[in-house]
Image (cartoon, grey):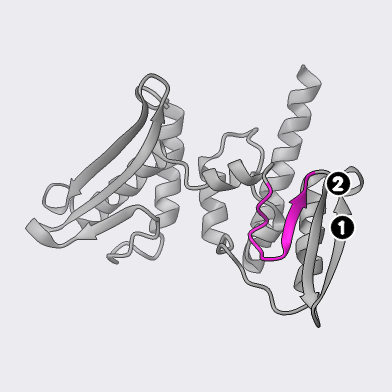
Amino acid sequence: MGGEPEEGRRVRAHKAAEIVLEGLETSTNSGLTGVSYTAQNGGTWMTAFVRSDRNVGKVQTSRKFRVREHGFTEAKRLAIQFRLVHHNPFERYTKERNAVNAGIKGVYFHKSSKCWRASWKQQGRGISKDFKVSEFGFDGAKERAIEFRKTNGPSIQMECGRLTRRDVRVWEALAESDDDVPFTRSDVESDASDVFRKITKRSREAVGRREEGE
């Protein structure tokens, strides 16, 4: 994203930062990857990341917010907000929505068959079950493959953590009204399922209204 971020993005990032801060106002744990605290020189909250610029490509970006200038909690909030404005913490879900990574060992997308496959080995023999995209849709087939793998075969290995209730609320605060939800039900913890259902319903309704207007 080049130039100054849009004002709407700033407003949404401010709201999302407040959610990240809940219960962590006095903690040195930021609650957001890429935002950290150092006690040196009176204390500083900082964030650093690489962002894409259409004109110059990859840009290393960093910002420091000193406690002496802003106070502890406000410096923390500003660092979180700055990162959320310039860096989407849900980018990997957006990229993986149409990708082949399910986040669980033994579940993958089989391109030639256009299906999600759950597989494992039992007594040296390969076992698998396919869920066709043509029958269940891309996300539906993925979810069914994950659920099937969870309830069959040896214990699974999660390759990436699931989204918590707080995470889902942060995405909701950052998203525009008609943004598609990039993650699926299998990506969220059980205690976040009600929030996930709400934002998914809202997103579908927004997409329906958008399509009607076209």
Q: Which residue bears the numbered disc 1? A: 130
- In the picture, measured across the screen, residue 186 lies left or right of residue 68, that is right
The residue under label 2 is which amino acid type? Ser
Comes first in the chain, label 1 or label 2: 2
- Residue 75 lies, in percent from the top left, at 23, 50
Q: Where 59 sits versus 49, above or below?
A: above
The residue that appears at 57% across and 34% down in the rendered structure is 176
- In the picture, measured across the screen, residue 139 lies left or right of residue 167, that is right
* Image quarter of the C terminus: top right
Mark in front: 1 vs 2: 2
Q: Which residues are magenta?
A: 100-111
Q: Where 80 sits versus 122, above or below?
A: above
The residue that appears at 51% across and 50% down in the rendered structure is 170
Farthest right residue?
Answer: 135
The magenta stretch spans residue 179: no
Farthest top residue?
Answer: 214
Farthest front residue?
Answer: 124
* Image quarter of the N terminus: top left
SS state under label 2: loop
- Residue 5 lies, in percent from the top left, at 39, 27
Spatial separation of the CA atoms under disc 1 and disc 2: 9 Å
SS state under label 1: strand
Q: Which residue bears the numbered disc 2? A: 113
